[in-house]
Amino acid sequence: MPTTAIKPDIDALAALDDKLRFLSAWIIHHANNVRPSSDGLKVGGHQASCASMTAIMAALYFHALGPNDRVAVKPHAGPVLHAIHYLLGSQTLEQLQNFRGFGGMQSYPSRTKDKIPVDFSTGSVGLGIAITAFASLVQDYLTAHGKLAEEDRGRFVALIGDAELDEGNIYECLIEAYKHDIRGLWWIVDYNRQSLDATSADRMFERFDEIFASCGWRTVELRYGKRLAAALAKHRAVRDWLDNLPNADSAALLYQGGAAWRARITADLGKQGAAFLKSLDDAELGALMSNLGGHCMETLTEAFDAAMDDVPTLFVAWTVKGFGLPFAGHKDNHSGLMNPTQAHAMRDAMGIAEGDEWSPLAGIGGNARAGVEALIDATRIRRDKRPRDFGRIAIPAIPAPSGDEQATQAAFGRILLDLSRAGGDLADRIVTTSPDVTVSTNLGAWVNQRGLFKRREMADVFAQAKIPSAQKWSATNQGQHIELGIAESNLFLLLAALGLSGDLFGERLVPIGTLYDPFIARGLDSLNYACYQDARFLLVATPSGITLGPEGGAHQSINPPLIALGQPGLRHYEPAFADELAAMIEEAFRLIDDPAGESTYLRLSTRSIAQLERTEDSWKSGALAGGYWLREPGPNAEAAIVAMGAIMPEALAAHDELAADIPGLGLLAVTSPNLLHRGWTAAQASRWSGNHQPSHIETLLARLAPGAGLVTLCDAAPASLSWIGGVLGNRVAPLGVERFGQTGTLADLYAAYRIDGAAITEAVAELLLPFRM
Ligand SMILES: Cc1ncc(C[n+]2csc(CCOP(=O)(O)OP(=O)(O)O)c2C)c(N)n1
Ligand SMILES: [Mg+2]
């Protein structure tokens, strides 16, 4: 992280600002107006959002950033980032010309898809901001654990659209960041006071200032550029007037230009404005009034240079949306595109010859050219896209905890405790985290062993006072559990940052997060965001379903298996037994470290059930592939029970009861609907590539008679399993939970929601009826 400033070359930086504004606009123009369109769809892009930020980004990338600094770029300024890499030689012309095309540079910066180094993907506004705080926490964790040298530490920068500040996840993160004493952050707001639809509410700057300041942040307002500030200093009345001009009025005037400013100042201030206006023609007046802090290179570099310590800093840089473009300030400019005439006029005004639009330094002449070349050479940011960092962790066999009766949730706690006691590289790389449900998700024993992480030591007051407690909550910088407040979005963002530690810091961690299954929905977009970036972690959601009995409907989850069915990058496992769970955890660790792997979601239960006596391990590969025959079907069986998770005892009991009457009745234990589904669709696709392999679910179901009936059973939305009937054309009686749960004993609830033995028997009977007639 740079701690001292370099003298800025203002002229060269200003030339780079112009160049980035042109190139980002031209990338979008080319995609929309030059590249042939085969489908007639508008390609789109955000020239105004880019133009608003080019000065800020020029000052950052060509002046302030150091080699270890990481940046989350406002989604709609993606083209500016690509233009920077183009100037640095780390992005190709082909990619720029294929903006928003198949295989081309992405609409919004993407870690996984773009060819340039992208530190954090962005797109869903707000999330890219908050992840920088958690990445900084991970950096502190690695430093404290001796895995990252002081000189390799970086600063975390978020480039923020002002409307993004409406996203609640930012404030959840701000609170957590304060608790963890997070440092080394620069959040830079492109304060153009325009969102997608409209101009933003007035007076918000003061509020942001107060909110951030109360969380320990330094706030820096960059309102006026040097020239405008100097002019206003001489004309107090104009300054007071401009200070209080509503955002919408200011935007409209910026759009209309000098003549409109003159008319308005004259109307509002009369004689008091005359002296200010006197020496300026309309063009000069228009330029002066748009000389805001976020477009003034001296203001920006001074502000960055003055914030080289590690105090988290919010810069509010006032800008004009669409600065320098024909639709600057227009309230409808968010998706505005210059027409070809306007784009050509911009090119000509930049001194760029026709046909020379892509040549990096075209139009930069005179004194600035040498300075620009020098800045491009001297830029300290990383130019290359490094291969992702995988493949370092030896994963020991994870034995199943012993015990005749066990719940998967308790078994999870035991497995982690055993791992902790055994020690070793894997155990040392595990970082656990939970949003205030550490104890109730069974992480307590692990935390007692491995301790809480805090950068500054925190004593356990209860322990010091010798008050008996099962939990030891003293915290040191060697602890391996990061406790979060109750904000599930933060959990997923921290998992995302921890799960990218190999990529961000060259040191892989093994993150495990626990939460209550229904509250996955609380942070779902953050979970999706973590998966989108291919962060790797293990998510343990526990407890689940109406099997939670007396806790009632507010805590009983119904649809997470459906969420998992549609979530790329996340593998859902739902074990019934502790030995299955152990195999899945081992697999999840392997997947974290495998370049072709993914994250894992375990849906666990507090219900203690009788464990199976297994004499061999052949079930294991099936369980890891999504399912296995717990009771083998007979030849040409006419029916099977297909069950998942904590209600396996009901399925087993029903099987015992029905087996005598229905010869060959099978019991299929499903451990991962989403793996089975993925395998099925992949097999379908492979049919057309000439390399067909039947999928796991097809192979399993092929054991039954054609058209055999299936009773599917899960403590979740029945659609989680009912689709299985479509694989080979089996008729299905889907049992599961479709209404909100309620309190009660398991017998009450299973009967009321028809997932008990009686429901299974009735469903099997109904399926077989047509065959019997
Ligand atoms: C979570 C989410 N909701 C909605 C959108 C659609 N959207 C994209 S940009 C935007 C407003 C952007 O305004 P601002 O952040 O001020 O950026 P500017 O373009 O003005 O710089 C919206 C609503 C989104 N990308 N993400
Ligand atoms: Mg805005």
Image: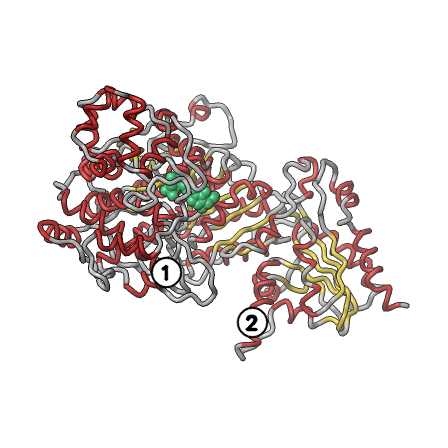
Relative vertical location of residue 521 with respect to residue 269 in this rendering, above or below: below
The quarter of the rendered structure image containing the C terminus is: bottom right
Mark 1 and 2 residues: CB-CB less than 8 Å, in contact?
Answer: no
Q: Work out whether residue 740 or residue 632 is closer to the camera in this orientation and state it.
A: 740
Relative vertical location of residue 645 with respect to residue 547 in this rendering, above or below: below
The disc label shown at residue 270, or none: none
Determine which residue is flagged by label 1.
33
Relative vertical location of residue 319 with respect to residue 398 in this rendering, above or below: above
Q: What residue type is labelled 1?
A: Asn
Determine which residue is flagged by label 2.
685
Residue 497 at x, y percent in the picture = 39, 46
Q: Work out whether residue 151 or residue 371 is closer to the camera in this orientation and state it.
A: 371
Instruction: Find ligand 2 in the image and state its quadrant.
Output: top left
The image quarter in which residue 769 lies = bottom right
Residue at image x 41%, y 33%? Answer: 200
The quarter of the rendered structure image containing the N terminus is: top left
Q: Is mark 1 on a helix, strand or loop?
A: helix
Q: Can you see residue 290?
A: yes
Q: What residue type is labelled 2?
A: Ala
The answer to whether residue 472 is left or right of residue 766 is left
Residue at image x 81%, y 60%? Answer: 764
Q: Is mark 2 on a helix, strand or loop?
A: helix
